[in-house]
Amino acid sequence: MAHFPSSLQAKYSLESSDLYNKLDTVWLKELEQKEQEAQKNKPVDKSLSIIEELILSKKLREEKLCKAMLADMGIKKYRKFTLPTNEILEAIRNKKEIDGFNIANAVKNPKFRFYTSDSPLASLEISNTMASVIKDIKDSNIFMKRGRQKRQENADEYARNIHSIINEVTVHETFKSFREAANFLNDQKIPTPLNKRWQPRTLTLLNQRWEALGLSTLTPKPK
């Protein structure tokens, strides 16, 4: 077996190492170039994955169910939004329009509904809840308004009835003040609205109501 001087062995080893490094570099570059060309020439797969298809199918079924529910509730005013549900709610809170549509004003109508394409059933349920709350508030306001009207009617009726009574007993009387008039009515056992004693302020308020009703007033006059 031939033996090479150590200097030659070192030189050969170094040259072999450099050669391998160069070959590795060239091979990697060629491999990278081929991979890039393969990616460029690879046809684009536009088909949906199975999971994506299932999600889309579920949303489409939910949307059909939403329309069926709206028809069953007799709701004709509704709107579908492509924006996420959270953005719709944010627009309502901040009173912002969506594509020129004022959603904040629309939800004030208890007969209006909306749903979103990202979560049709969940967003419709939110819309139903909002409509229910709005309806309760409006019903409460109507009830309170009717209550005020009824109280007003009762107060006017009492004012007319007590006017004729007080007018009859005071027709020949002259009072320097409402306090003097109140004392006189108490002495005559004339009932107050709450069956208590007459006070100057009570008589003053009643006098104002008489004036509003176009009735003669009890005006104190100095003697």
Image (cartoon, rainbow, N blue to C red):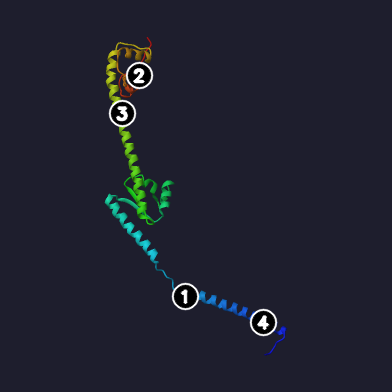
What residue does disc 4 label?
A: 13
**Mark 1 or mark 2, earlier in chain:** 1
- The residue lying at 27 percent from left, 21 percent from top is 161
**Contact? badges 4 and 1 (CB < 8 Å):** no
Is 66 placed above or below 200 here?
below
82 vs 7, left or right, is left
Q: Is residue 111 above or below residue 67?
A: above
User: Residue 43 lies in what quarter of the image?
Assistant: bottom left
Q: Is residue 117 above or below residue 43?
A: above
Q: Amino acid at mark 2?
A: Leu
Instruction: Choose the circle earlier in sequence order: 4 or 1.
Output: 4
How many angstroms separate mark 4 from mark 3 (CA)? 112 Å
Give the residue at mark 2.
203
Provide the residue designation for mark 3. 151
Residue behind mark 1:
41
Q: Quadrant of the C terminus?
A: top left
Farthest residue to the top: give it: 223
Check if mark 4's residue and mark 3's residue have beta carbons within 8 Å: no
Spatial separation of the CA atoms under disc 2 and disc 3 = 18 Å
Q: Count the labels in the image.
A: 4
Q: Amino acid at mark 3?
A: Arg
Q: CA distance from mark 2 to mark 4?
A: 123 Å
Question: What is the spatial separation of the Cα atoms under label 4 and label 1, in whole angstroms?
Answer: 42 Å
Disc 2 is placed on an element classified as helix
Label located before the other in sequence (3 or 1): 1
How far apart marks 3 and 1 lie (CA) works out to 84 Å
Q: Nearer the viewer, mark 2 or mark 4?
A: 4
SS assignment at label 3: helix
